[in-house]
């Protein structure tokens, strides 16, 4: 059975590796609810660099095969930067009077707080069983906050909760596109909620 699964896995990987293009990708993340009673009178800038230096990294069973799938997913239309920015701004707007989206760090003094957000490596760890193939997916992230004097008041990094998606060895491209879309659409709101809660807890002065 072990050899059968190994052979199936390698066949699937060959199919994925040979894909010239993936199916179209469109993220549909929902804005989370921070459940905050009142807004703080602060002007906040949310910085998500575009392009953002992230990777979508596929790792096969037991790490015997790895592949950077970032070029394929970007070509398929994955707009991770804009979706991360949109959801973060909408989330933070529940807690602060004015929130704007930027692509790069502003000059000191323009905002009461500058929040620099990024996703690094999105890891898709494959598992193969008699019922089919799936990927456990997590995303590494970074958050830093600067005050009005451009002094760093918070720096955090972490890994998102894990989400799983299934796909088929017989038709891998649609499964990967749909799967990555679904898990990233779940991960982004989870991160935005954690970031928004952390930012709201800071004692920032206007």
Image (cartoon, rainbow, N blue to C red):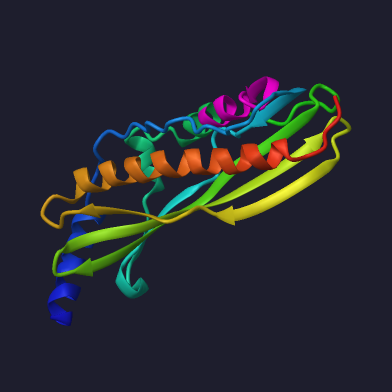
Residue at 40%, 46% in the rendered image: 70
The percent coordinates of residue 50 (x first, y second) are 56, 32
Note whether 152 is above or below 27 in the view shown: below
27 horizontally vs 188: left or right: left
Q: Would residue 72 be visible to someone looking at this image?
A: no
187 horizontally vs 100: left or right: left
Residue lying farthest to the bottom in this orientation: 2
**Quadrant including the C terminus:** top right
Note whether 198 is above or below 133 in the view shown: above
The percent coordinates of residue 138 (x first, y second) are 45, 55
Residue at 61%, 25% in the rendered image: 94
Residue at 37%, 33% in the rendered image: 27
Residue at 70%, 38% in the rendered image: 199
Q: Would residue 84 be visible to someone looking at this image?
A: yes
Range drawn in magenta? 87-102
**Quadrant including the N terminus:** bottom left
The percent coordinates of residue 109 (x first, y second) are 86, 24
The percent coordinates of residue 112 (x first, y second) are 81, 26
Residue lying farthest to the top in this orientation: 98
52 horizontally vs 197: left or right: left
Taking the magenta stretch, the answer to whether it contains residue 162 is no
The residue nearer to you, when weighing 173 against 95, is 95
Taking the magenta stretch, the answer to whether it contains residue 92 is yes
Note whether 77 is above or below 69 in the view shown: above
Note whether 134 is above or below 97 in the view shown: below
């Amino acid at each position: 059975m072990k050899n059968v699964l190994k052979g199936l896995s390698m066949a699937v990987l060959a199919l994925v590796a040979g894909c010239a293009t993936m199916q179209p990708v469109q993220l549909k993340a929902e804005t989370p609810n921070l459940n905050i009673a009142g807004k703080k009178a602060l002007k906040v800038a949310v910085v998500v660099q575009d392009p953002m230096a992230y990777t979508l990294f596929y790792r096969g069973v037991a790490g015997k095969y790895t592949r950077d799938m970032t070029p394929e997913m970007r070509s398929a239309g994955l707009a991770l930067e804009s979706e991360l920015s949109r959801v973060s701004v909408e989330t933070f707007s529940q807690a602060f009077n004015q929130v704007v989206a930027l692509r790069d760090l502003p000059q000191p003094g323009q905002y009461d707080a500058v929040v620099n957000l990024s996703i690094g490596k999105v890891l898709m760890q494959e598992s193969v069983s008699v019922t089919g193939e799936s990927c456990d997916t997590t995303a590494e992230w970074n958050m830093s906050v600067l005050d009005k004097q451009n002094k760093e008041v918070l720096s955090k990094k972490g890994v998102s909760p894990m989400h799983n998606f299934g796909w088929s060895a017989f038709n891998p491209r649609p499964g990967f596109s749909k799967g990555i879309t679904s898990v990233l659409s779940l991960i982004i709101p989870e991160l935005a909620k954690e970031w928004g809660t952390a930012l709201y807890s800071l004692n920032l002065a206007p």
